[in-house]
Amino acid sequence: MYAYKAVKQDFIASDNLIGLMHKFTGMVNLVIGIMIEKNLTSRNSVSKETYHMLREYDMPSYYYPEAINKAVALVKTYRKRLKKKQKATIPHVYRPMLATYYGFRISNGNLMIPIAARTYESIPLNAHTLKVISAVKVHSFALSAYTLSL
């Protein structure tokens, strides 16, 4: 059984990370558009349809599955609202974000995030974050422009 624990830390994203976040947001929006246009519902069919298109974004492939997962979750919520006859607008991600559960590592008190092939961006973790994650295995991370969540 996994222990679920989350910790947030403030940080300022570098230009490399900001660019990566904008690409990730673009990938999520592309997948949302394709899902709605082709009426795709299952994660598997969405992956088969969109995975090759995500290569155009020139990002490490670690981020593809999470972009697909985020898009599927947003479209699923949108469709539930439509079924219940509630107000629903086609989902679109506006804020830059970045998330994955592959390819990152924590070493020497830093979170190492892949930004290109064998190239990593280092984010120093504060003492509180290191203390919280010392007892558990980190399975994923999420970044916004000013926040890191592990």
Image (cartoon, rainbow, N blue to C red):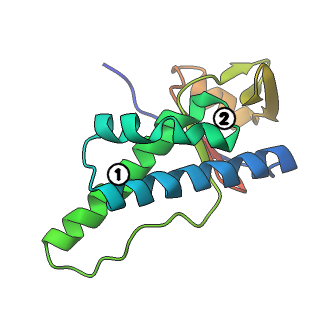
Q: Which mark is residue 27?
A: none
Identified at 83% across, 44% down, the residue is 16
Q: For numbered disc 1, what is the local secondary structure? A: helix
Q: Quadrant of the N terminus?
A: top left
Would residue 72 appear left or right of 104 to someone viewing this image? left
Circles 2 and 1: CB atoms closer than 8 Å: no
Residue 149 image offset from top left, x and y in percent: 59, 43
CA gap between label 2 and label 1 equals: 28 Å
Residue found at the far left of this picture: 84
Identified at 14% across, 69% down, the residue is 83
Asked where in the image residue 76 lies, by quadrant, the reply is bottom left
Asked where in the image residue 142 lies, by quadrant, the reply is top right
Asked where in the image residue 48 lies, by quadrant, the reply is top left
Q: Can residue 8 be seen at all in this image of the molecule?
A: no
Q: Nearer the viewer, residue 9 or 55?
A: 55
Residue 85 image offset from top left, x and y in percent: 15, 79
Residue found at the far bottom of this picture: 87
Residue 43 image offset from top left, x and y in percent: 31, 39
Would residue 41 appear left or right of 101 to someone viewing this image? left
Q: Which mark is residue 129?
A: 2
What amino acid is at disc 2? Thr
Q: Can residue 139 be seen at all in this image of the molecule?
A: yes
Using the image, determine if residue 31 lies above or below residue 134.
below
Q: Nearer the viewer, residue 135 or 21?
A: 21
